[in-house]
Image: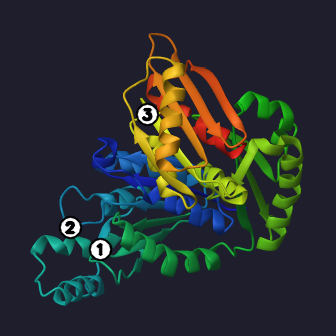
């Protein structure tokens, strides 16, 4: 199965001034085509460093995709860097210059002299016309690898990837395989407990099974490589059945499912409405429930109640005013070493209080408390 590496170019990414969304998009597109992604690298706007990153990757991979650095300014170094990496000069292409001028004419503008830099590519490169921007892309083929230089502007990069690069890769690599993934979501349980039940599945080669822990939630990713999408999905389904059998109601959904939607869907099935009262969460619980679809009648933000009795009385009062069937209260108290969380819920079948403590990073306490609250709701 062919392999790929992605090199994102831009000092602004290294400085944290912009978020790199291109790598996520490219990773998924490569996976869909059955291409293994081995490494992701970010390099600043420096010709020598970019060239070194490319040279390091050339012996080990079938495809290198770069994004960024194809603009008209001095700090757009990708063309020179690729040429340096493979040991050639850059050359001016008249047809690319005409394409650049045509793009500017569409906008009623005239390109400046420095725009001519965008008409240079490494000698022998395959030029890739960019119909949605001013920066032409290019592909350089070596004996074992294709170096594909794409613009950093996401809209342009995505268009060229979809309409130019994928067809090229399909022919160049004779792609016949696919890689598919399934993400299974769990809550109310720790990563070690899940590992204890499905650890043998994590040793499989194909499909592969991996865990990713979040604050109050753990994801299980099942990834299969096969000759067809149907075959890959069938392989995933076999493993997914085993995961479901072993983990039971720890699982609340898959792929794009959210914990808040799982909770509200459960309430809808019971014919209940929900209201919440929260303190110390900065409105996170209310916001997440309001963003989902279901019988959520609203929430109230409070300063922290002094004790559990105070919280229960507040919930009883709010239940009357909101006319909700169920009212959940959540308070978060920050301590020096651990954070104290109190969940209290009033339902048609009775009241319940759940005291919890959280010893993880202070900044994650709110999200952890919200996820514990939503997990409680989906199991009522």
- Packing grade of label 2 (10 A; few <14, some 14-19, many >=20) is some
Name which residue lies at 28% across and 48% down: 12
Q: Which one is earlier in the sequence, the residue at label 2 or at label 1?
A: 2
- Packing grade of label 1 (10 A; few <14, some 14-19, many >=20) is many
Q: Find disc 3 in the rendering and name its residue.
A: 281
Q: Find disc 2 in the rendering and name its residue.
A: 72
Name which residue lies at 48% across and 37% down: 317
Q: Which one is earlier in the sequence, the residue at label 3 or at label 2?
A: 2
Q: Is residue 275 above or below residue 236?
A: above
Q: Provide residue 170's location: percent of width, then percent of height.
A: 63, 77
Name which residue lies at 25% across and 72% down: 118
Q: Provide residue 380's location: percent of width, then percent of height.
A: 72, 42
- Residue nearer the viewer, 72 or 370: 370
Q: Find disc 1 in the rendering and name its residue.
A: 135
What is the spatial separation of the Cα atoms under label 3 and label 2, in whole angstroms?
A: 47 Å
Whether residue 34 is visible, yes or no, is yes
Q: Quadrant of the N terminus?
A: bottom right
């Amino acid at each position: 199965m062919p392999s790929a590496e992605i090199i994102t170019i831009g000092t602004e990414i290294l400085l944290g001034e912009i978020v790199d969304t291109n790598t996520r998009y490219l990773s998924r597109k490569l996976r869909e085509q059955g291409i293994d992604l081995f490494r992701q690298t970010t390099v600043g706007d420096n010709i020598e460093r970019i060239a070194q990153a490319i040279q390091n990757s050339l012996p080990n991979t079938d495809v290198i995709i770069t994004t960024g650095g194809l603009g008209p300014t001095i700090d757009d170094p990708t063309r020179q860097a690729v040429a340096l990496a493979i040991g050639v000069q850059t050359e001016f292409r008249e047809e690319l210059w005409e394409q650049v001028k045509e793009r500017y004419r569409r906008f009623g503008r005239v390109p400046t002299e420095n725009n001519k830099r965008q008409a240079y590519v490494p000698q022998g490169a395959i030029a890739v016309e960019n119909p949605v921007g001013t920066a032409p892309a290019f592909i350089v083929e070596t004996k074992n690898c294709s170096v594909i230089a794409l613009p950093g502007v996401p809209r342009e990069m995505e268009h060229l990837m979809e309409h130019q690069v994928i067809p090229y890769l399909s022919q160049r690599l004779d792609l016949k395989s696919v890689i598919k993934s399934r993400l299974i979501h769990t809550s109310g349980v720790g990563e070690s407990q899940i590992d204890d039940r499905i650890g043998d599945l994590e040793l499989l080669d194909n499909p592969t099974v991996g865990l990713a822990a979040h604050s109050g939630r753990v994801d299980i990713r099942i990834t299969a490589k096969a000759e067809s999408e149907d075959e890959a999905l069938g392989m995933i389904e076999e493993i997914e059945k085993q995961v479901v059998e072993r983990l039971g109601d720890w699982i609340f959904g898959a792929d794009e499912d959210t914990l808040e939607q799982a909770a509200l869907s459960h309430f809808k099935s019971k014919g209940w409405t929900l209201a919440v009262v929260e303190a110390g969460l900065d409105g996170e619980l209310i916001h997440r429930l309001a963003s989902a679809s279901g019988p959520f009648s609203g929430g109230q933000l409070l300063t922290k109640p002094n004790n559990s009795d105070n919280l229960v009385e507040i919930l009883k009062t709010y239940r009357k005013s909101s006319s909700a069937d169920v009212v959940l209260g959540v308070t978060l108290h920050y301590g020096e070493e651990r954070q104290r969380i109190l969940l209290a819920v009033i339902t048609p079948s009775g009241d319940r209080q759940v005291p919890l403590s959280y010893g993880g990073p202070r900044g994650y306490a709110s999200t952890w408390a919200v996820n514990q609250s939503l997990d409680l709701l989906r199991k009522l």
